[in-house]
Image (spheres, grey):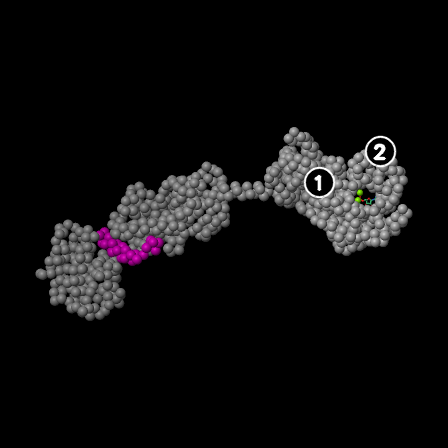
Amino acid sequence: MMLSAPFSSLLSHKNADSLSVAAFEAHIHQLCQMMQTLLHAGKVTFWLLHPARSEVICLQDIPHPERIGLSIPIDAISALSDAFNHASVLEFPNAHLDARLRNTPIGHEPVDIIMARVVCDDDTQGMLVCRKEQDHDWPINSRALVNHFVALAEQALLMLQPDAIAWRHLLWQQRLHKLTYQLATKTGRLFFTELVEQLANEIGADAVWIGELLQVGHGAASVRIIAGCGATIALEHHRYPLQESSCRLLYLADDWIIQSMPDVPATMLIQPKWLIAVPLRHNQQRIIGHLSFTFADQHPDPNELVRALQPLLTRIEAELIRYQAESELRLSSVAFDTNKGCIITDPTLTIMRVNLAFTEITGISAEQAIGCELGKEIWSFSEQQGDALLKGQHWRGEMERRRLNGELYPQWETWTPVQDETNRFSHYVISIDDLTERVRSSQRIQALAYYDELTGLANRRRLLEQVNVLFEQAKAQDEVGALLFIDLDHFKNINDSLGHAAGDWVLQQVAERLKPFFTKNDELARLGGDEFVALLPGLSSNPPQAEMHATLLAEQVIEAVSAPYYYAGQVLHLGASIGMTLYPTRHQTPADLLKQADTAMYQAKADGRSTVRAFDATMQRKVDKRLRIHNQLRDALRNNELSLHYQPQHMVSTGDLIGAEALIRWQMPEGGMISPIEFIPIAEETDLIIDIGQWVMEEACHQYMHWYALDIKLPQLSVNVSAKQFHHSKFTERVYDVLDKTGMLPEALNLEITESVVLEGLEDTIQKMTELKSIGISFSIDDFGTGYSSLGYLTRLPVNELKIDRTFIKGIPNDVSNMAIAEAVLAMARHLGFNVTAEGVETRQQLQFLKQQSCHFYQGYLASKPLPADVMAIYASDHLRKK
Ligand code: C2E
Ligand code: MG
Ligand code: MG
């Protein structure tokens, strides 16, 4: 027959040996293609009857290979005909199909089909179904052609020597073939998840999973599940040590394995009877993962299974390689493009990769790190961090970590979850920053902010913080502590006479001498200048005892500071005055401590320096009063509560009135009178003294000119000027202002300054005095003898007069030493060409004494108390007229 040649050639190269399943399939495929061409058939399908005879399976479908593997219940076919039982070839023009066949390759009705039965033996049957192409008729010899096909197919079936095994294989093959089609358009995670589900279905396994072998360096190899179904489904991304699973045998054997009562990781929650595992390879060589099947009781022949899986395995392997490459690619773009330390983990936090910077920071090599689990083998998590990671959230923060060499260091960590194409977490990228340097420099900044550069002691800021802390601590622990305020005596002299370098050196020496007295629980600080503070916590639980301890310590400190200093061939002497306060006491706040100790320190200074004073309630009252006065003094100026009294000054020899001193008075609204001895020092603490002094000068000059106009022409008017007022940059201008405003005669104006003015700046004093003297103003040194009394500066000052303080006059005629001082001052003044005014002359004897000593002028109660302006006017006109 003309057309039989191609058919027979199909089998001609084969001998009578058995055909492999694959070869058999190839034959059937070719036969079906032939049939399609020869019969002008639209479709050709070849079905095989399942040995159990419950279904038929599509072995070939041209041109719809995706339908291969499809099964149809047998009764759907038998309802159409009894072809399988009887006829060899049947033609069905306009056949009506069983409803269940409509969606099958046999297709839509009405159809023209030819069916032919292929019989090998009783058990093995196949069926050919050809469906006519629409515009063609069947060829005349169609029956013969179909018969020929049947003969060839029977021959092939015979050569397959089909048995149960081959059948099953064939069935799997078809089903897996179908699966390959189903998965053709899928990739990545979707591919794997669908694959394992379908496989479990088709093969009848309890659980199926695909595991990826994690690249091992150091430590045990492990397997990460890419996709799983059965009980493993919850365990995607789960990682298990290869050692725990029978799968390890696969890697040992380098081939598939079957294992009865296998070890599976406990976390998988299955206890299978059988495990079959098939390797997945990279380019048919090294194993990169495996496909595992577990079975509860019956298992398929692994040989068959593996053979059936073969075409699919190639696809799985390709997909796995692609998957790994893609995730690497995804990762590398996110992560490794950085010079920060970097770690990549899988979702179980098992390290997959680290970069060089990681190794540099931690000292842990890539080989050591890979395969380790973060949070277990390397590092641990804070609670907060652990929470964030559990929820798959981004986390960043500072952690303390340990390097391989054991060194602890601070580290900034950023944990970023990476998602795959289905938005599930596939990796973590952790970047790390070694903060050691940053912490070090912030410590340096801290040191600058909290410590005194010169002495290395704590500074004011640190002290104030510590005061707060230790104060609260003392309260909580019911213990008494003390704060010592240490102020050096005469430090200013050293600084002024020897310069700042010497001053700095001395301060450093003092700091060194102080340090040994204090423990590390104490806080020793330098507030600035020559002020030091020591905070002594927990001295005792009993206040008197605490005070005793602190006093003793303070006395030792004074002694140590007072020992001589040897600087550049010179011997320097210093002292220290210490004020002390105990804490905590009632109504006391931490802020009070420094003020109280400072007050006590001033008391120590007032009490003759180089001594300790403890703060007490009297001091507190004084402090309170000072504060009250200070506040009221502001208003006093505005409210005209201030006035001037004038004390007459006389010639000792003749008793002539030669002038008056203006003395301020404060009449408080409540009726009290406050002495300038009390409020002037308070005004001097602030700039208030500048305004008050200005007022006094203007008022006094105004008064003088008023008298002058009334023909009461006093030779001189004395006005007191305080140090702050004098050293104000605008002082001379203000004096000119007053002269302008009042018309005051400059030659009648005498300014009284104290030695403290000179001490606060000799050059400024000389310059201003010289300038004012040039326009006729004269100067007196007030309270001479009570202050620093260095004769050295006197010669340099353009001074006209000294006023001997009344404390020296008071002793006359009984106090020999005071008299001696008065005598000496007078002798020196004579020698230097100064006039001398004696203050506070109350008795005739005192005046007599002054006369003997050739003192020039005096003022005091003997002549008159300071007088209100109107009374002074009468006094003055009386005396001036007498003259
Ligand atoms: P001072 O400048 O040494 O004034 C003399 C003080 O001695 C006055 O005290 C005066 O009343 C007092 N006094 C005078 N004669 C006698 C006497 O015979 N016996 C006694 N026991 N005292 C006598 P006052 O007025 O209380 O002033 C005290 C100090 O206040 C003044 O001492 C002066 O340093 C300061 N002061 C007074 N007014 C002013 C002022 O307007 N400006 C400045 N900066 N200080 C002033
Ligand atoms: Mg005076
Ligand atoms: Mg005086």
Please give the range of residues in magenta.
165-193
Q: Which of 400 and 565 is in front in this view?
A: 565
In terms of sequence position, does the residue under pointer 1 or pointer 2 come before the other?
1
Disc 2 residue lies near ligand 1 with CB under 8 A: no
Q: What element carries label 2?
A: helix
Q: Are marks 1 and 2 in contact (CB under 8 Å)?
A: no
Residue 223: x, y in percent? 36, 46
Residue 509: x, y in percent? 64, 34
Q: Quickly name the residue at label 2.
A: 816
Which of the labelled discs sits on residue 762, or is there none?
Answer: 1
Q: What element carries label 1?
A: helix
Residue 43 belongs to magenta span: no
Residue lying at the far left in this picture: please name it. 1
Q: Nearer the viewer, residue 204 or 733?
A: 733
- Give the residue type that dot 2 points to: Val
Classed neighbour count for the residue bearing mark 2: other residues with Cα under 10 Å, few (<14), some (14–19), many (≥20): few
Residue lying at the far top in this picture: please name it. 569
- Quadrant for the N terminus, please: bottom left
Q: Which of 603 and 93 is in front in this view?
A: 603
Q: Nearer the viewer, mark 1 or mark 2?
A: 1
Q: Which residue is drawn at 22% across and 70% down?
A: 110
Dividing the image into four quarters, tell me where ligand 1 lies. Answer: top right
The quadrant in which residue 340 appears is: top left
Residue 806 visible in the current orientation: no
Q: Residue at x 48, y 38 (%)?
A: 407
Q: Residue at x 14, y 51 (%)?
A: 14
- Give the residue type that dot 1 points to: Leu
Residue 179 belongs to magenta span: yes
Residue 335: x, y in percent? 40, 48
Q: Which residue is drawn at 69% across and 32% down?
A: 573
